[in-house]
Image (spheres, rainbow, N blue to C red):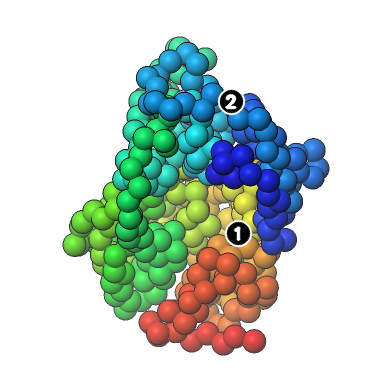
Amino acid sequence: MISGLNLFACITGDDSLKKRPMDRVISPLAKLGKDIRARQNNSKLPAAIIPVEMQNQSTTVKSISKSTPTIKTQVSSAQVKSALLLASLKTDGINVIESQQTRDHTERMLTFMGFSVLENVMQNEHEPESDQNVHQITLPGGQLSKLKPRDYVLDIPGDLSSAAFLITAALLVPGSQVKLLNCGLNPTRTGFVKILQQLGARITITNNTTLAAEPRGDINVEYSPCLQGFQLGKNLVPDTIDELPLLAVIAVLSHGTTKVSGAEELRYKESDRISAITQELTKLGADITETQDGFIVNGPTQLTGNVVDSHGDHRIAMALTVAALTAQGKTIIKNSDCINISYPGFIQDLTKLGAIIEQH
């Protein structure tokens, strides 16, 4: 957004964000003519955005043409796609091509605000023999100057990735019954729920509605003792990327073998989540094996309390908290303050639901 506005700024972050790869965003922005400089060969925060001479600022909406730049993302990432769309609002627009459709909150928000955003599924020109299509998002240029000022009410639904921890706890703790109100049900985010329903989870959706272009509803969850192991491949990873550590916990208590593959992106989050969740669940007694792009779990296994570590990653800390609710004995989770990064009320919400948790 800042590069698109042609402003100077320096962006930094906490210790976990400083470890994450930024070249996946900086490199495609550089192809659009943006000047962004960061440490470690333009790959890590802090990053400075340098103003450049603005060119091709359209005053009328342009049709899609060869002059519209096309960027094919190297990883299926909604963050990278959104960065490219926002950086192109004041220019000739952009075509973004991704190997799989990713979460589309930005496209929905832009459409809600009056922008024209086009989507198209087409054959992969680099692999014409493949049956794997690619997803193209087109933002025609020149729209910003044509939009009429108005007030927008962006009603934001509950975050399904945060709700997933409460959903999992309800599924795994005997006697549980939980209703989560006004949760976001964007189809690009509901892969986790759909997978669980296929495994035999007692999950129902009620009060479906759409506000500010985002679907939402209430999620009803009950204890589900007969969950089955599953196979999860690359085609489903983008829809479940944040919930994969939780799926590892669920797999430990499910019947049969679970295999998750095509999830190497997990290694580049706040921690190496494949390694972290494998190491820590093993300490609790899980039969889980790390692979290059995922993990293999044999279940069900009765977990036993132990001392584990969050690796400074909020999602690992919360996944281990849910696992601890099912374990025999006491579990101590070290470095759990990171939970406050995304869900400050997590421990309080679990306590309200009956969990016994002490914080030190």
Q: Residue furthest right?
A: 40
Circle on res. 277 = 1
Along the line of sight, the residue nearer the viewer: 31 or 223: 31
Per the rendering, the mark at residue 55 is 2
Say if mark 2 contacts mark 1, CB within 8 Å.
no
Relative horizontal placement of residue 89, taking residue 219 as reference (left or right): right
Q: SS class of the residue under badge 2?
A: loop
Disc 2 packing (10 Å; few <14; some 14–19; many ≥20): few
* Amino acid identity at mark 1: Ile
Q: Position of residue 62 (x, y in %)?
A: 40, 22
Q: Is residue 59 above or below residue 272?
A: above
Q: Residue at x 55, y 62 (%)?
A: 315
Q: Is residue 150 visible?
A: yes
Instruction: Tell me the amino acid under the disc marked 2.
Output: Gln
Q: Position of residue 359 (x, y in %)?
A: 59, 85
Residue ID at (44%, 84%)? 351
SS at circle 1:
helix
Residue 251 in view in this figure = no
